[in-house]
């Protein structure tokens, strides 16, 4: 069991971070008293709010050429945003906690809110950012006030509202990889009480991966968005803000390179007759970013929505209502084997319809006792089609692997026909026994892995949830405030799954095949002990063992010594001398390896025969927050927080989904996550800057782990996952032209208890052949950096009364860490990323910015995974290479 670092070591690192932060400064502006946040759903300054929150301003986003939330993480060391297989698989992580990207039945642990509206799907949150006012990153559980699926934290995006004075901006960007972006916004009055804002953007760029099969680009950008707002203020005490948005994405994305080319991948690349002779991604130089895809990998996404926020000052009390409705469709097709061979594709089609309603009633004014009560309602319908379709070369690929075990598909298909003849039909020797091929029947020659067959799955999910919450702040003295909050959350999900294996071979259970009916293969085919034509009556030869299946489902064969003529006459009822030897079956080593069978047996749900598999989850929880905040001086605040959080249960909506195991309890669902947080924080402001420090101990019970195993995803609850650490967030302007920022996050995450983690062929210590699970308790959580540092320096200068300029440099460091637990630990991720920009701005609002992101061309992996249907191989997604360009903007 790994031991945690000592408190003394942590204290030394913390003191070093504090000292450096005091000298150099976090991730926002120097004058923190001017930064307004709504982390408690009340407007407060960054220094007043007793919560660990980072703020990224619109000015920082413009100067750094940040295009979406993926780029935001450069400024916030506790945040990590990663786009994987496509735009729908974008994962948000805060303090090492977060999931939900790879399956529509699993929601994120980090909630994203845009203008107060919860965006339930990551794809709805990553497109080009609209005209921004600020982005707030709230760290730690936020379930009491934000409700659904914020057990790890929340990202709150606030856009600029319409103004009653004319204004706007237009901008154009050109960069390498033929990047061309346009963006514009216009706001103004329609009447004395009605104002509008319209904005739009386009984002186009060639891909930085090269497909070595046809020379085309992959990982391109091709997206656009429009957004319209109306602000109606009929009186000084009432306002209504109506927002409508539409966005579209149509991209070739996302390719994966090879880190390890195992034997199966090498078979694909080997020349005939030793292999398929197809192009494969070279593993020796992953950052050449060469992928091998025989079909286009595309991602088409369309999202649209409308929201209405109403605010009404009732005199001492404010009423807020936020209503929203959204639709999102997402269609993707992936060359899922990531090779130049025509093995398989993975088309997916997702459709979401989401309605939310929030009501809040809160005290206003300068009160000794402030309070807020409210409720949140969420209703979402999901329709999901997910297929895996075999290509024209999959049968040859399987035969090449079976050759290593002394057989081929024609032999196996013939063996199934022998088994069928022995047990069914006229002349069957053993009519009372089950055939090897079970319900699937005999396999016709050439039927296995036929092009166009595979697995077809149709899934639905209806999710209805609500929460009611209340919070208060009571000033015990002028300097000491006690706060408390409580919320009741209720979540009900109903799911259906209809999954059909259209490939006959995939319907066989290889485990049973090897230990029972596989004996027919061993004795009658490989041993040649039963003569006769396939499919017809088999002539019995008493001089050799005769295989058969017992009624109990085990295999046996007749001992030829004990088998006599009298017994032969009563072969159906005779008491045989039985002997079992599964090693006679050459297919036995294939079981559990995903070499020739890529899908689990499919069981549709709800399943009336299994009360545990009723397609329903109904969960509820009470969460609460308790906090003490103390103003030590006018410039130093301290707070202590104890908070709980909760995330509802999840469904695995895919062909990987398994019927519930009555022994382990694992199956197609995961139980809820429960979070507990202790946090001690300090916020200090001083002339020219601020420094904020948070020390925390955060624990998630039942963390929903969803890890790819090479043929599918293993959804399971990690018994307990915890993370202890600290954060420093600071800013300092030593003199007027220069602003320095510094942020550091130290994390020590571990699986306190995770006894049923999915097995992997790379873990030979804990996983022997055929084992499904292993114990990761006491190990460090992979993919979570121990140290993350974000720092920047911005120099501004007035060249004249009409012209000013700036120069800015940003640096992000993330310490080396293994990527994920199901690939070799030697495959790691370490980040040393630098961005630079310089700009000039005139008094008339004309601005020119030159920028470069990843200026040193740092190379690192975003994530890795076992290569699909290629046991022993590893694929990975890489970061973007150096990009640079120029942006021209005119504000008016």
Image: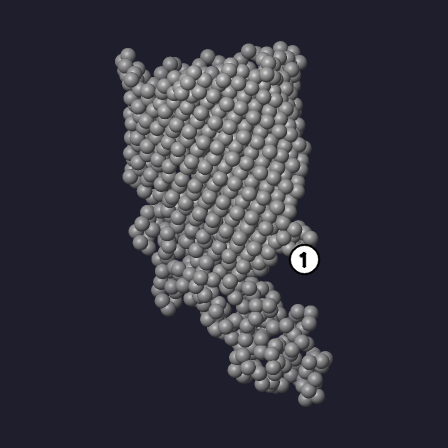
Image quadrant containing the C terminus: top left
Pointer 1 local density, CA inside 10 Å: few below 14, some 14–19, many at least 20: few
Query: Would you place residue 572 above or below residue 59 in this image?
Result: below
Q: Is residue 746 visible?
A: no
- Horizontal and vertical percent position of residue 861: 43, 43
Query: Is residue 735 positioned above or below 757 on the image?
Result: above
Which image quarter: residue 536? bottom right
Q: Is residue 25 above or below residue 266?
A: above
Residue carrying label 1: 609
Q: Nearer the viewer, residue 464 or 146?
A: 464
Left or right of 483 on screen, residue 20: left
Residue ID at (66%, 13%):
476
> x%, y% of residue 567?
70, 85
Residue 704 as seen in the image, left or right of residue 890: right
**Residue 736 visible from this viewpoint:** yes
Residue 800's x, y, as percent? 27, 13
On the rendered structure, is 641 left or right of 203? right
């Amino acid at each position: 069991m790994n031991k945690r670092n000592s408190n003394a070591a942590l204290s030394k690192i913390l003191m070093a971070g504090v000292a450096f932060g005091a000298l150099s400064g976090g991730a926002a502006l120097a004058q923190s008293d001017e930064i307004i946040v709504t982390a408690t759903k009340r407007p407060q300054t960054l220094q007043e709010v007793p919560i660990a929150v980072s703020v990224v301003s619109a000015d920082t986003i413009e100067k750094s050429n940040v295009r979406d939330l993926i780029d935001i993480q450069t400024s916030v060391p506790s945040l990590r945003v990663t786009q994987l297989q496509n735009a729908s698989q974008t994962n948000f992580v805060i303090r090492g906690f977060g999931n939900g990207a790879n399956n529509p039945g699993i929601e994120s642990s980090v909630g994203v809110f845009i203008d107060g509206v919860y965006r339930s799907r990551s794809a709805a949150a990553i497109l080009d950012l609209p005209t921004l006012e600020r982005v707030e990153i709230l760290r730690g559980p936020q379930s009491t006030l934000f409700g659904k699926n914020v057990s790890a934290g929340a990202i709150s995006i606030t856009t600029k509202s319409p103004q009653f004075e004319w204004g706007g901006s237009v901008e154009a960007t050109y960069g390498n990889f033929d990047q061309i972006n346009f963006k514009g916004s216009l706001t103004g009055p329609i009447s004395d009480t009605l104002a509008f804002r319209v904005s739009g953007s386009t984002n186009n760029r060639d891909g930085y991966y090269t497909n070595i099969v046809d020379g085309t680009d992959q990982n391109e950008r091709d997206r656009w968005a429009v957004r319209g707002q109306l602000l109606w203020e009929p009186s000084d005490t009432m306002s209504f803000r109506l927002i409508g948005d539409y966005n579209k994405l149509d991209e070739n994305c996302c390719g994966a390179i090879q880190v390890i080319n195992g034997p199966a991948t090498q078979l694909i690349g080997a020349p005939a007759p030793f292999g398929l002779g197809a192009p494969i991604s070279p593993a020796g130089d992953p950052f050449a970013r060469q992928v091998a895809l025989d079909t286009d990998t595309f991602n088409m996404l369309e999202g649209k929505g409308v929201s209405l926020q109403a605010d009404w000052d009732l005199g001492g009390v404010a009423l807020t209502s936020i209503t929203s409705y959204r639709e999102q469709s997402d269609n993707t097709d992936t060359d899922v084997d990531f090779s130049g061979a025509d093995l398989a594709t993975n088309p997916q089609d997702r459709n979401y319809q989401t309605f939310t309603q929030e009501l809040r009633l809160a005290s206003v004014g300068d009160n000794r006792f402030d309070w807020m009560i409210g409720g949140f309602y969420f209703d979402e319908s999901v329709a999901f089609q997910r297929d895996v379709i075999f290509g024209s070369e999959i049968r040859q690929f399987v035969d090449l692997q079976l050759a290593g075990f002394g057989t081929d598909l024609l032999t196996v298909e013939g063996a199934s026909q022998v088994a069928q003849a022995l047990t069914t039909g006229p002349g069957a020797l053993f009519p009372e026994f089950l055939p090897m091929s079970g319900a699937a029947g005999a396999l016709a020659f050439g039927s296995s892995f036929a092009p166009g067959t595979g697995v077809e799955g149709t899934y639905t999910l209806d999710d209805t949830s609500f929460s009611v919450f209340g919070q208060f702040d009571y000033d015990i003295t002028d300097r000491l405030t006690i706060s408390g909050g409580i919320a009741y959350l209720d979540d009900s999900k109903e799911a259906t799954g209809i999954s059909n294996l259209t490939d006959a071979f995939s319907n066989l259970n290889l485990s049973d095949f090897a230990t029972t009916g596989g004996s027919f293969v061993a004795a009658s085919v490989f041993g040649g002990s039963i003569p006769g034509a396939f499919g017809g009556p088999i002539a019995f030869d008493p001089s050799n063992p005769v295989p058969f299946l017992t009624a109990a489902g085990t295999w046996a064969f007749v001992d030829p010594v004990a088998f006599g003529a009298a017994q032969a006459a009563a072969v159906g009822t005779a008491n045989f001398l039985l002997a079992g030897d599964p090693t006679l079956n050459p297919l036995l080593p294939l079981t559990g390896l995903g070499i020739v069978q890529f899908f689990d047996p499919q069981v549709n749900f709800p399943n009336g025969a299994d009360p545990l598999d009723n397609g329903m989850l109904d969960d509820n929880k009470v969460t609460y927050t308790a906090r003490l905040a103390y103003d030590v001086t006018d410039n130093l605040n301290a707070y202590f927080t104890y908070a709980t959080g909760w995330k509802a249960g999840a469904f695995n909506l895919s062909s990987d989904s398994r019927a519930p195991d009555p022994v382990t309890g694992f199956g197609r669902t995961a139980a809820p996550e429960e979070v507990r947080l202790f946090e001690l924080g300090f916020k200090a402001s001083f002339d020219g800057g601020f420094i904020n420090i948070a020390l925390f101990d955060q624990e998630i019970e039942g963390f929903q782990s969803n890890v790819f195993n090479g043929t599918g995803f293993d959804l399971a609850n990690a018994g307990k996952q915890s993370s202890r650490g600290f954060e420093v967030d600071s800013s300092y302007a030593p003199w007027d032209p220069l602003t320095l920022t510094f942020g550091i996050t130290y994390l020590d995450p571990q699986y306190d208890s995770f006894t049923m983690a999915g097995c992997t062929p790379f873990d030979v210590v804990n996983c022997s052949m055929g084992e499904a699970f292993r114990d990761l308790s006491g190990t460090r959580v992979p993919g979570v950096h121990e140290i993350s540092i974000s720092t920047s320096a911005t120099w501004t200068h007035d060249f004249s009364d009409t012209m000013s300029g700036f120069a800015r440099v940003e640096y992000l460091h993330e310490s080396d860490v293994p990527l994920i637990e199901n690939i070799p630990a030697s495959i790691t991720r370490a980040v040393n990323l630098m961005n630079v920009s310089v700009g000039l701005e005139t008094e008339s609002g004309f601005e020119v910015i030159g920028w470069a992101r990843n200026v040193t061309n740092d190379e690192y992996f975003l994530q890795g995974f076992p290569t699909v249907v290629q046991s022993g191989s590893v694929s990975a997604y890489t970061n973007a290479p150096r990009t640079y360009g120029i942006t021209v903007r005119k504000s008016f």
